[in-house]
Amino acid sequence: MEELIKIKDLFVEYRVGGVVSNALNGLNLTINKGEALGLVGESGAGKTTTALSILQLLPQDVGFITNGDITYHGESVLTKTDKEMGDIRGAKISMVFQNPLTSLNPVFTVGEQIEMVLHRHNPKLNKNELKKRAGDLLEMVGIARYRLADYPHQFSGGMRQRVGIAAALACTPELLIADEPTTALDVTIQAQILELMKKLQHEISTSLVMITHNLGIISELCEKVAVMYAGQVIEYGTVKEVFTKTAHWYTYGLLNAMPKLSGERERLVSIPGSVVNSENLPSGCKFHPRCAHCTERCKTETPPLVNMSETHQVACWEARKA
């Protein structure tokens, strides 16, 4: 497959009030053209930071890339100017943000907000063409065209998220990043949004990065999955291999913590301990303080990603044998 985004040995720090948080710690990840990739992990694993780094949207004067590189079609995004990144955002790479209430501007109609995106990357479109295209986009996500004149507060949470998806897809981007787009929605609306994203991804052949802590969403939407912990990818592969031939004990813990819908009821197995403190990371494998299979080597040496198969990688000295 053609390589679209490549993240190599990426380190990101957040610096607030003299305190340094290590958000990404040597992240390596490839996103191919046309594929759907899931990023999964607990809160604080670095999933959103990864997305913001790709788009160069880390908080100014707070978030810093200290090492590594991110390339888009082989060109580093870290060396691009603000104008060059502005041309990429929305047109080539778009993002659907987590909270549909705060990602839309309350003082503009939804039509005006979609038209702004269209006009930014298609300045030759006249007012009528912009309105028609914005209406087409709303209908594409299941909202009636006449609602272009409505404001965000007049929509439900699920409808606002649909508007966000319409705006993100306005210029038919090569890559759509969805940052937990169903977190604030009820289960029925979640299912509708996921079905919509699945349909649109196939219709316009865009690449998709789905950021979530919900493994069920990953199995439904994605072909590949990257499991993150403490700012690193610790297991990567096809969804089938990672879920059925799980090699990392953290991934195994995540899967065991999911309730089963069939068979006998069993007590859920939780992962012991708490998420690692990014201000004071442990040495060696970052998961070792919570791992029942930890050895002395795990405490001192950081495991690299190694191949379990052609499409399955894991970073673990004591990898589980499926």
Image (tube, grey):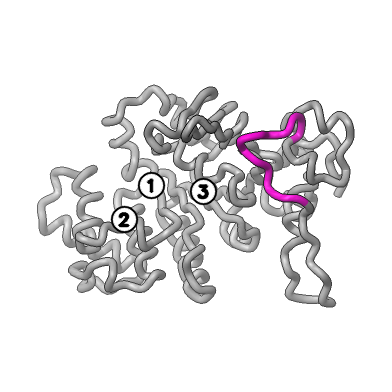
- For image coordinates 43% across by 45% down, the residue present is 175
Judge the density around disc 1: few (<14), some (14-19), many (≥20) Cα neighbours within 10 Å. many
Q: Quadrant of residue 85?
A: top left
Sequence-first tag of 2 and 3: 2
Name the residue beneath numbered marker 1: 94
Judge the density around disc 2: few (<14), some (14-19), many (≥20) Cα neighbours within 10 Å. many
Number of the label disc, if any, that sits on residue 157: none
Q: Is residue 41 above or below residue 19?
A: below
Q: CA distance from mark 3 to mark 1?
A: 10 Å
Labelled pair 2, 1 in contact (Cβ < 8 Å): yes
The x and y percentages for residue 285 are 76, 34
The answer to whether 53 appears left or right of 132 in the picture is right
Does dot 1 land on a helix, a strand or a loop? strand
Name the residue beneath numbered marker 3: 209
Name the residue beneath numbered marker 2: 167
Could you tell me the amino acid type at mark 1? Ser
Q: Which residues are magenta?
A: 273-285
The answer to whether 99 appears left or right of 311 in the picture is left
- For image coordinates 29% across by 36% down, the residue present is 86
> Of residues 285 and 275, which is closer to you in this image?
275
Does dot 2 land on a helix, a strand or a loop? helix
The x and y percentages for residue 291 are 82, 45
Could you tell me the amino acid type at mark 3? Val
